[in-house]
Image (cartoon, helix red, strand yellow):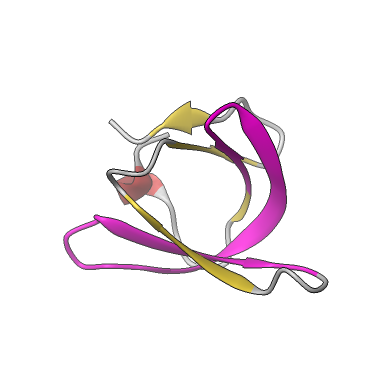
Amino acid sequence: MPWGQLRRGARVHIVAEGRYLGEGTVDGLSRDVSTLWVQFGGVEGRRMFHRSDNVAVGLRGTRARRNL
């Protein structure tokens, strides 16, 4: 999913390099849409992803897609 369509508070799931990382909440997005922050539950906490990372994001209930 294109990151520019994400909004703070959206529930998303993350897949990185073919590995499911879990569900979280969008906590922030840089102005140039190159960096995404996701708040995971439990001990994982807040995590940052960059556009160049091999990460796919999907809204809860949808299939995760890479940021194009």
- Name the quadrant of the C terminus: top left
Residue 26: in magenta span = yes
What residue is shown at x 71% (from left), y 51% (from top)?
A: 23
Q: Which residue extends farthest right? A: 42
Kindly report the secondary structure that dominates the magenta region of the rendered protein. Answer: strand
| Vertical comparison of 67 with 44: above or below | above
Q: Is 13 or 45 nearer to us in this picture?
A: 45
Image coords of residue 27 (percent x, y): 51, 71
What residue is shown at x 69% (from left), y 37% (from top)?
A: 20
Q: Is 16 or 36 nearer to us in this picture?
A: 16
| Vertical comparison of 56 with 47: above or below | above
Residue 58: in magenta span = no
Image quadrant in which you'd find residue 21: top right
What residue is shown at x 79% (from left), y 74% (from top)?
A: 43
Q: Which residue extends farthest left? A: 32
What's drawn in magenta, residue-wise? 13-41
What residue is shown at x 43% (from left), y 52% (from top)?
A: 6
Image coords of residue 46 (percent x, y): 59, 73
